[in-house]
Image: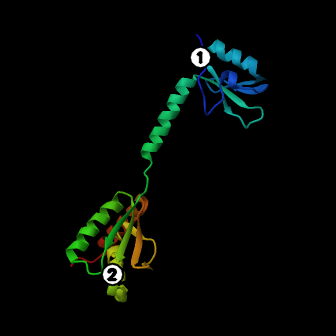
Amino acid sequence: MEVFLIASTDYEINEEIRDRELRLISENGEQLGIMSADKALDIAHEAGLDLVKVAPQANPPVCRLIDYGKFRFEQSKREKEARKKQHVVEVKEIRMSPGIGEHDVNVKLRNGRRFLENGDRLKVTVRFRGREMAHTHIGEKLLLDFAENCVDIASLDASPRLDGRFMSIFLSPLSPAALKKRKSQEEKESDEAPDA
């Protein structure tokens, strides 16, 4: 079987390995000992495998006998799976004004809860216009009420902060473990409550 050179970016393979001595490991994982790079390359060619330097920082460097194409394929599959499982946390923003109606607040609250349940952080902002700046306490109450309505699925990162004409809070979704803990506490409290 003929072994072809594969262009490598991550690992040195076959003739790319320039070290005089290296520690060789078979494809089963057993140590074959320390030997010259030429001898290790001959062993790899006889077995129909590639010689891949897996630990260049070791002294002597560690090389392994593997099918490099198969190795790269499995590695890319693992990376793809890891990317699939990874969730990029976005910061979603909901804007309101101090004079917002009750129904509009409920719609914004429903959307905010949906964002939090999807695992995204939420920034809730109240924008003051003109004379509304004299009544920032209304906006603060609005933000705190919003946070109170999301307390079962999110935690408030910091108290409301005024930045120019905007007052905002950040809500972070609770971790699955924290959600479980909170649900079990609520169940415990409802069991302990006397029946009416």
> Marks 2 and 1, Cα distance to the nearest angstrom?
70 Å
Quadrant assignment for the N terminus: top right
From the image, tell me which residue sits under label 2.
129
Q: Amino acid at mark 1?
A: Phe
Question: Nearer the observer, disc 2 or disc 1?
Answer: 2
Number of disc labels = 2
Residue at the farthest bottom position: 134
- Is residue 24 visible to us here? yes
Q: Nearer the viewer, residue 67 or 170?
A: 170
Q: Earlier in the sequence, mark 2 or mark 1?
A: 1
Q: Residue 164: x percent and y percent?
A: 43, 79
Which residue lies at the image location 62% right of the left edge and 21% below the top edge?
50
Q: Which of 154 and 131 lies nearest the eye of the viewer?
A: 131
Question: Secondary structure under badge 1?
Answer: loop
Q: Which residue is mark 1?
A: 4
Q: Residue furthest front?
A: 130
- Within 10 Å of disc 2 (Cα), the crowding (few <14, some 14-19, many 20+) is few
Against 40, residue 183 (above or below) is below
Quadrant, the C terminus: bottom left
Relative height, residue 114 to residue 151 (above, below): above
The image position of residue 107, as x and y in percent, is 23, 68
Q: Which three-letter amino acid code belongs to the residue tagged 2?
A: Arg
Element on which disc 2 rests:
loop
Toward which corner of the image does residue 134 lie, by quadrant?
bottom left
Residue 28 location in percent, x, y? Answer: 61, 24
The residue at 37%/82% (across/down) is 140
How packed is label 1: few (under 14 Cα within 10 Å), some, or many (20 or more)? few
